[in-house]
Image: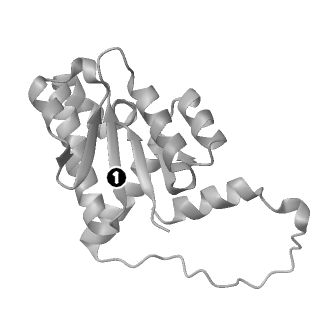
Amino acid sequence: MSIHIIIDGYNLIRRSSSLSTFDQQDIQLGREALLDTLATYKRIKRHKITVVFDGTNASPFALQKDQIKGIKVKFSRNGETADTVIKRMAAREREKALVVSSDLDIVNFAASMGAATISSSAFEEKITMAVYMDTKGLESQDQGGWTPTTKKKGPSRRLSKRKRRNRIKIKKL
């Protein structure tokens, strides 16, 4: 099952230390820097990615483009917020979606619809690590094998089904 990553664009840009510097210079530079980073990530991981921005600050030229560098870009319409668009997409995609946002309202709604969620800062770490490993040619160090131990794990330590699904989707990043 493929993952559809739905990103709250301005939330990710403004929470990122590297992207926020571009955003402070010009809002368009921040969007372009994010899309460049995501294009590199998409080339490595091949997930379907949609970035949602508030359409109130967008130039009319930017509103016309639907896909940039393989990343689907959506701007909310006038009178509508990006949060509403993200919630609508999460409700439609359900288990196929991974929502990237640090906005608790969006995160709680997406989780209630069955979508996996990850914070903006954690997602930025994942894409930075994936790009770094690709440029350095490193293999993933997670061997996934069994480690012998005498520590007992009973059912009381087992995560809920929702949290286990969420963990599986995040491992695919």
Please state if 78 lies on the left or on the right of 15 as rendered. Answer: left
Q: Tell me how many marks there are.
A: 1
Q: Position of residue 11 (x, y in %)?
A: 40, 31
Quadrant hosting residue 151? bottom right
Q: Residue at x 69, y 54 (%)?
A: 163
Quadrant hosting residue 110? top right
Residue marked by disc 1: 49
**Residue 49, placed above or below residue 147:** above
**Residue 116, placed above or below residue 16:** below
| In-front residue for pair 7/2 | 2
Q: Position of residue 68 (x, y in %)?
A: 17, 48
| In-front residue for pair 5/125 | 5
Name which residue type carries label 1: Ile
Residue positioned most to the front: 92
Q: Residue at x 54, y 41 (%)?
A: 91
Quadrant of image for the C terminus: bottom left
Task: Please tell me how crowded label 1 is: few (under 14), some (14-19), or many (20+) other residues with Cα within 10 Å.
Answer: many
Is residue 33 among what the camera can see? yes
| In-front residue for pair 11/19 | 11
Please state if 86 lies on the left or on the right of 35 as rendered. Answer: right
Please state if 161 lies on the left or on the right of 165 as rendered. Answer: right
